[in-house]
Image: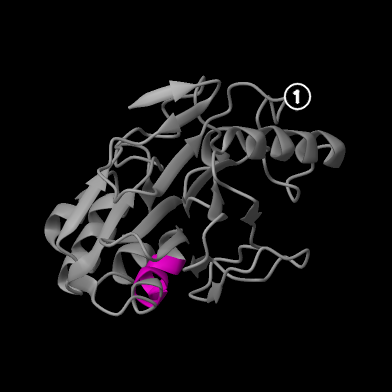
């Protein structure tokens, strides 16, 4: 895993001409509690700072002309990325266009990147527990012609030692194996978002899944975390076909 100025290159074998990056909170000009490389305009940060951070990001993404940002609402909606000024309401985007990065913003939810094994199509999805239970990853996978030919990357999210949930969350994943939830105090459970996602995708036919298991809650110097801090910035996970 290489890291330069707050941007991580995932340890993920991709086809030639496809790139992926993960941002952290390092760098940028946002002030506390959004310090420093916040990329979200909806969290209360100064908009001028966020747009400056986004311009800085774009300059560092080789082969990218524009980024498809989304208005994320914990849905299972997927859009075709087009990179226009209008930001669609959705939690995933997919594209076959070169130079257009699919991106999602997170601060504990699970970012998932998808790539066809011939490098001709990519996608990015935002999966909180609600979106995951409602099938956002399966809807994203359906954008590809053959799940067996899709490479998947699970980016950092809230880890299983920090993701304490109630029985209603566990009940939403009745199909999950016992490895996905560990009993906590009382009626509480510790959930594993990455394992839930992996089980769902493997059952749908995906054969190749890579992951960065960093916990966003436990790594305060590197990652934003809503559960840890409340008011918080957002990091981005991006994938694109080089122009």
Picture residue at 42% right of the left edge, 44% below the top: 20
| Front-most of residues 175 and 113 | 113
Given the current orientation, which residue lies at the most extreme front position? Answer: 243
Neighbours of disc 1 within 10 Å: few (<14), some (14-19), many (20+): some
Residue 215 lies in magenta, yes or no?
no
Q: Is residue 20 visible?
A: yes
Residue 140 on image: x %, y %: 40, 72
The residue nearer to you, when weighing 15 against 210, is 15
Q: Helix, strand or loop at disc 1?
A: loop
Which secondary structure is most common in the magenta stretch?
helix
Determine whether 40 is above or below 30 in the image. Answer: below
Residue on which disc 1 sits: 29
Q: Is residue 126 left or right of residue 65?
A: left
| Above or below: residue 28 compared with residue 90 | above
Residue in the image at 18% along x and 56% along y:
208
Which residue occupies the foreground of this view, 228 or 216?
216
Residue located 22% across and 58% down the image = 198
**Nearer to us in this view, 242 or 207:** 242
Q: Position of residue 65 (x, y in %)?
A: 64, 51
Q: Which residues are magenta?
A: 131-139
Judge whether 52 appears above or below 84 on screen. above
Side (left or right) of 50 relative to 119: right
Q: Residue 29: give x, y in percent of width and height.
A: 75, 24
Q: Quadrant of residue 81?
A: bottom right
Q: Position of residue 155 (x, y in %)?
A: 37, 44
- Give the side of residue 222 with respect to residue 135, left or right: right
Quadrant position of residue 1: top left
| Residue 232 appears in view | no
Quadrant for residue 85, please give it: bottom right
């Amino acid at each position: 895993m290489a890291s330069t100025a707050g941007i991580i290159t995932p340890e993920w074998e991709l086809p030639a001409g496809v790139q992926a990056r993960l941002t952290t909170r390092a760098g940028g000009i946002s002030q506390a509690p959004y310090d420093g490389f916040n990329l979200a305009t909806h969290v209360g940060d100064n908009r001028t700072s966020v747009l400056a951070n986004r311009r800085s990001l774009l300059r560092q993404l080789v082969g990218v002309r524009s980024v498809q940002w989304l208005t994320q609402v914990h849905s299972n909606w997927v859009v075709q990325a087009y990179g226009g000024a209008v930001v669609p309401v959705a939690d995933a985007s997919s594209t076959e266009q070169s130079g257009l990065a699919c991106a999602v913003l997170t601060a504990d939810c699970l970012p998932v990147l998808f790539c066809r094994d011939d490098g001709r199509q990519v996608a990015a999805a935002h999966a909180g527990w609600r979106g995951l239970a409602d099938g956002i990853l399966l809807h994203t996978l359906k954008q590809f012609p053959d799940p067996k030919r899709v490479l998947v990357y699970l980016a950092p999210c809230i880890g299983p030692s920090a993701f304490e949930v109630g029985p209603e969350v566990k009940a939403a994943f009745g199909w999950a194996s016992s490895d996905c939830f560990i009993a906590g105090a009382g009626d509480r459970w510790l959930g594993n978002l990455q394992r839930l996602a992996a089980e769902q995708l493997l059952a749908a036919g995906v054969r190749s899944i890579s992951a960065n298991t960093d916990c966003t809650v436990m790594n305060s110097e590197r990652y934003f975390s809503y559960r840890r801090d409340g008011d918080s910035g957002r990091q981005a996970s991006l994938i694109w076909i080089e122009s």
